[in-house]
Amino acid sequence: MKNDNRLSWAITLIFFGILFLMEHLQLFPEQVRYFLFDFRNYPFYAGIIFLLTSKNYTIGIILLSIGILFRLSDIIRLTQNVSEFIWPALLIAAGIVMLLGTKNRKR
């Protein structure tokens, strides 16, 4: 085990220890606890820790991907209404690009 992976594993274990302690102390309201301490988030948390602390990003990307896959149904549900805003956002972006393009040509 490389030294940077050892550090990442150590920080991950400390993080989960603190997380479980906060869960048992009930420091957060019920709605926050339901989301924060859901087991589907644990690979996501570990992936972020590995990406931030390790030079080998492979483990972090794998754990982050697993966490995202666990939450895929929630992500789809949250982004379901985004399609209503795509065309207005594209029109606004096109207008801004045209506006900035004409200002640069006048100079």
Image: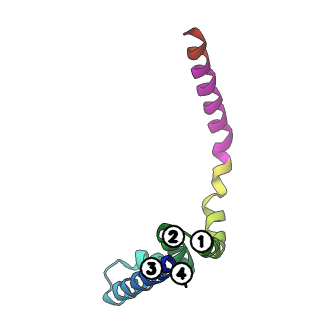
- Please state which of the two labelled residues, at mark 1 or mark 3, is closer to the viewer: 3
Amino acid type, mark 2: Ile
User: What is the magenta range?
Assistant: 84-101
- Please state which of the two labelled residues, at mark 2 or mark 3, is closer to the viewer: 3
Report helix, strand or loop for mark 2: helix
Q: Which residue is mark 2?
A: 48
Quarter of the image with the N terminus is bottom right
Q: Is residue 96 left or right of residue 35?
A: right
Decide whether the magenta segment is chiefly helix, strand or loop. helix
Is the residue marked by circle 1 packed among few (<14), some (14-19), or many (20+) residues within 10 Å?
A: many
Amino acid type, mark 3: Leu
How far is disc 3 from disc 4 in space, using C-alphas? 9 Å
62 or 30: nearer the eye?
62
Q: In the rendered view, would you say 77 is above or below 10? A: above
How far is disc 2 from disc 1 in space, using C-alphas? 7 Å
Q: Earlier in the sequence, mark 3 or mark 4?
A: 4
Query: Where does residue 44 sit, x and y in percent of width and height?
Result: 55, 74
Q: Which residue is mark 4?
A: 2
Q: Which residue is mark 1?
A: 64
Is the residue marked by circle 2 packed among few (<14), some (14-19), or many (20+) residues within 10 Å?
A: some
Q: Which residue is mark 3?
A: 7
Picture residue at 61% right of the left edge, 69% below the top = 74
